[in-house]
Image (cartoon, helix red, strand yellow):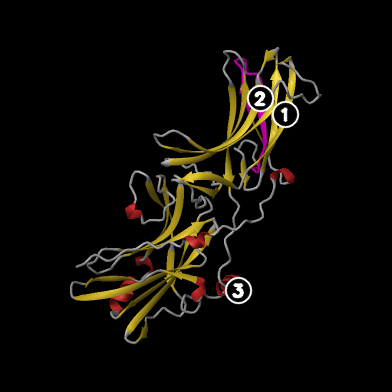
Amino acid sequence: MAEPPSYSARDHHARSRQSAGSSNLGAGVLGATYTISLENSKAHKWLSMRVLSRSSNPTSPPYFYQGDKITGHVDLDVLKSEAIKAITIKVTGSTTFVGQEENEFLMIEKELWSPSIPLSDGSKVLKFEKGKFSWPFSISLPSDVELHDGKTKRTFPLPSTFSERASAGYLDYKLTVTVRRGGLKFNQTLAASFAYVPVTRPQPPSLMLQKAFKENFPIVGPRGDPTGWHVLPTVTIKGTLFASRQVEISCILALANPLTYARGSAAPVWLTMLGTDIQALDLLSAPSAVQLFLVRSLATGLDATTDMDSAERRTDNFFVETVSKGVFWPAKNSSKSMIEKEVSRKVLQGEVEVKRSLKPSCLFPKFTTRVSASSLLPCCGCRSKPCHLAGGISSK
């Protein structure tokens, strides 16, 4: 028999980003102070960097939200007279792939001190005598960066930190202090990685879905609330039931609009099955027979931002993993097969968890992450290959 069809549908218009009124860390949203130091051979901490972070744990690496200012101090503890050419601090953002060099996409550098810049007491020095010195710093993180995507220069939102064990690629941010020395002496650096999280808020669902969530009412499916759902094209499963008769079941998967879901929430789904063979329909529509997965992909090639089917991508720069599994149950008032014009209909309601630990979706040159819901429909008792339904969503 012919292999069942498969498809992948994405709606990039539903990936709209809405600013959530980002707050300024330097304007009262205080956390712990993260401190990192350089020591000499005698364990003397001669260079330190103190960073104010949103983290409540002073031993945890700093993290910041969109719109935050990175503030803190750089401290120098000099034991004996020494010459220094300059002291700088910079913020960098870069992507790194296994076996490749680091690719920097963000760099903001500020000079804290040079012989032409006076100390806090107003004096200018050419070399530091014994004593302690400190410089405050404040660096604003941009919301966007302008980069080349292929041959075109475009503006992209600053992406979220992406650092997971055994990943094919990493997206990191660093805060680095550099002590520049003259002559043949080496420069010395003190660096701390930090996490960056864009601040976005999903658009609200339809009024009917909002009412159902708020008042704990049964959810109304696509037939009663057409604006509340993104309905994917129908997929037909054909096979032989118990080696005795041919059966054909039509499956329609719908995802709740808009296709942008907050991390730490559950994404509602709706599955409708239609067919003339009630026995086959009952077997296929058992909640345990349908598997729904949330799948995250990472594209790292030159075509990373291009919208194309996963089957068209190269396997050496496109990586897919399952991040959560959904559940189904019979929709209210649909426990029995409904018959319309000799066609029976079964309806399943479900949801898939969007884990809080899931990184936000990111459309970025050479580093794009996408999230999609993929449903696997096995033919229980039917001689047929499993059928896939897939729809793109965005996690925020």
Percent x, y of residue 376: 35, 63
Q: Nearer the viewer, residue 134 or 83?
A: 83
Residue underneath mark 1: 135
- Splitting the image into 4 quarters, where does residue 20 fall? bottom right
Q: Quadrant of the N terminus?
A: bottom left
Q: Which residue is mark 2?
A: 87
Label 1: element kind: strand
- Is label 2 or label 3 in front? 2
Q: Mark 2 belongs to which amino acid?
A: Ile
**Residue 228: where, in percent of width, then height?**
51, 72
Figure quadrant of residue 165:
top left
Stretch in magenta: 36-56
Image depth: mark 1 or mark 3 in front: 1
Q: Is residue 276 above or below residue 260?
A: below
Residue 389 at x, y percent in the picture: 36, 64
User: Could you tell which of marks 1 and 3 lies nearer the N-terminus?
Assistant: 1
- Visible residue check, residue 285: no
Q: Is residue 106 left or right of residue 314?
A: right
Please tell me which of labels 2 and 1 falls first in the chain.
Answer: 2
Up the image or down, 114 lies above or below 275; here it is above
Q: Which mark, residue 235?
A: none
Discs 2/1, front = 2
Q: Is residue 90 above or below residue 338?
A: above
Does the residue at mark 2 contact the one at mark 3 (Cβ under 8 Å)?
A: no
Tell me, yes or no, whether the highlighted magenta stretch contains residue 119.
no
Amino acid identity at mark 1: Trp
